[in-house]
Amino acid sequence: MFVDHAKDQYLPDLQRILDAGWLHAGSVVVADNMRVPGSPRYRDYMDETEGGRWHTEKHRAHVEYLSALPDLVFESTLLEAPVP
């Protein structure tokens, strides 16, 4: 799943998708623009669940059309399937 929309909706939308049962262990969620402008609640959630429910790799990137402005892309793999 690729997440690149309203940054304040990253976490609520991920939670809705998990609750709907659309992801399973091994599913990958890629979240863009994690530094600029950022999505603090999503970032905190992925940090708090690291190694438990999720494993996240943080890839260096840059803001679209502004290669001098560093950014991050999160690649998160679901380790633990949601309980139905």
Image: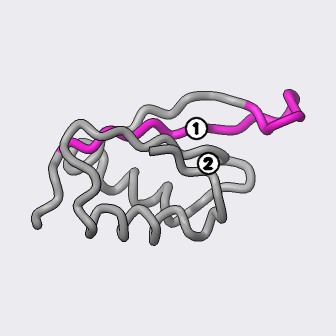
Q: Which mark is residue 12?
A: none
Q: Quadrant of residue 62?
A: top right
The residue labelled by disc 2 is: 34
Please give the name of the residue rendered at 26% of the width and 44% of the height, measured from the top-left corner.
78
Mark 1 or mark 2: whose residue is earlier in sequence? 2
61 or 5, which is in the foreground?
A: 5
**Around disc 1, counting alpha carbons within 10 Å, would you say few (fewer than 14), some (14 to 19), or many (20 or more)?**
some
Residue 76 lies left or right of residue 32; in this view the side is left
**Around disc 2, counting alpha carbons within 10 Å, would you say few (fewer than 14), some (14 to 19), or many (20 or more)?**
many
Image quadrant where one finds the N terminus? top left
Residue 1 lies left or right of residue 25; in this view the side is right
Residue 41 image offset from top left, x and y in percent: 51, 66
Please give the name of the residue rendered at 36% of the width and 38% of the height, measured from the top-left corner.
28
The residue labelled by disc 1 is: 73
Residue 38 image offset from top left, x and y in percent: 66, 55
- Magenta range is 62-79
Q: Assign a secondary structure to mark 2.
A: helix
Residue 44 located within the stretch drawn in magenta: no
Residue 5 image offset from top left, x and y in percent: 64, 58
- For the stretch drawn in magenta, the main secondary structure is strand
Q: Assign a secondary structure to mark 1.
A: strand
Q: Amino acid at mark 1?
A: Val
Are the residues flagged by discs 1 and 2 in contact, CB closer than 8 Å?
A: yes
Please give the name of the residue rendered at 36% of the width and 70% of the height, measured from the top-left corner.
16
Q: Amino acid at mark 2?
A: Met
Please give the name of the residue rendered at 39% of the width and 52% of the height, measured from the top-left corner.
46
Q: Is residue 14 above or below residue 35?
A: below
Residue 80 lies left or right of residue 58; in this view the side is left
